[in-house]
């Protein structure tokens, strides 16, 4: 489960992405246009230290873009090239936001969703000591491949044809940056749908 906070963010996540996205090789849309949220899903860090959220957004009237992010309470050593920016969170203080493809906590959780249909984290707020669950904004469907979820070294690979490659152990995963409806590969994949997008789009797959 993912605990959320009712907080003010400066800059907001979308404001941060408006400045960061146009510099990405896979960017499509109107540079300088407001970035709008389409849907989102989260994974849960087993250690409870890192926020892991994937945003589906548009820049202006451009196509849907997939942006996995991690949020940390301190800089991640060796990950300057994956830093999206720093957010001032009114509850948690400074939060360093990274492109999750370059964060070692992300790849094993993505692998579990792709290969074992681990799903998304349930999101909730604490209200007067009670949990208030936030409805999901989209559905996720992974594959049940029967393959063990890999462990081992994690690395970020290159951008290749509109996907970003991440590796965990002996498994190579492709994160689709401009997701569209597509068949799920036999090796395993993660698909998603949201209101207004009834036909599932391919979000990630094993290569």
Image (cartoon, rainbow, N blue to C red):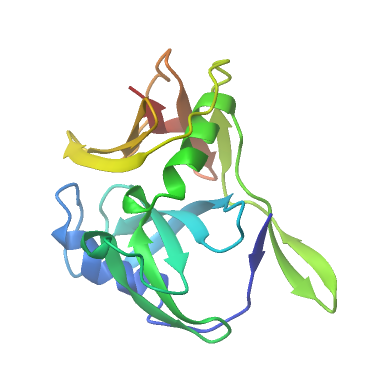
Q: Does residue 197 appear anywhere in the picture?
A: no
Q: Nearer the viewer, residue 205 or 139?
A: 205
Farthest-out residue, front: 152
Image height of 134 relative to 139, above or below: below
Q: Does residue 89 appear anywhere in the picture?
A: yes
Residue at screen point 85% across, 75% down? 129
Residue at screen point 23% across, 39% down? 157
x and y, in percent, of residue 49 in the image: 56, 64
The picture quadrant where one finds residue 124 is: bottom right
The picture quadrant where one finds residue 118 is: top right
Residue 190 is left or right of residue 137, and the answer is left
Residue 59 is left or right of residue 112, and the answer is left
Image height of 201 relative to 106, above or below: above
Count of marks placed on residues: 0
Residue at screen point 39% across, 31% down? 169
x and y, in percent, of residue 200 in the image: 48, 31
x and y, in percent, of residue 190 in the image: 48, 31
Q: In which quarter of the image is the C terminus?
A: top left
Farthest-out residue, top: 186
x and y, in percent, of residue 110 in the image: 47, 39
Q: Nearer the viewer, residue 189 or 78?
A: 78
The picture quadrant where one finds residue 174 is: top left
Residue 38 is left or right of residue 5, and the answer is left
Residue 157 is left or right of residue 110, and the answer is left
Q: Quadrant of the N terminus?
A: bottom right
Residue at screen point 50% across, 36% down? 192
């Amino acid at each position: 489960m993912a605990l959320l906070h009712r907080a003010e963010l400066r800059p907001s996540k979308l404001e941060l992405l408006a400045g960061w996205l146009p510099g990405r090789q896979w960017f499509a849309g109107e540079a300088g246009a407001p970035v709008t949220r389409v849907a989102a899903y989260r994974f849960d860090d087993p250690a409870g230290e890192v926020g892991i959220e994937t945003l589906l957004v548009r820049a202006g009237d451009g196509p849907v873009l997939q942006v996995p992010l991690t949020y940390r309470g301190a800089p991640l050593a060796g990950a300057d090239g994956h830093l999206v920016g720093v957010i001032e969170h009114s509850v948690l203080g400074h939060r360093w936001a990274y492109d999750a493809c370059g964060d070692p906590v992300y790849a094993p959780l993505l692998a579990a969703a792709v290969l074992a249909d681990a799903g998304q984290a349930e999101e909730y707020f604490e209200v007067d000591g009670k949990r208030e669950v936030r409805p999901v904004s989209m559905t996720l469907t992974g594959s049940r491949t029967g393959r063990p979820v890999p462990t081992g070294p994690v690395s970020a690979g290159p951008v290749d044809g509109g996907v970003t490659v991440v590796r965990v152990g002996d498994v190579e995963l492709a994160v689709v940056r401009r997701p569209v409806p597509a068949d799920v590969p036999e090796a395993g994949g993660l698909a998603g749908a949201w209101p207004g997008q009834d036909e599932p789009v391919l979000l990630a797959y094993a290569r």
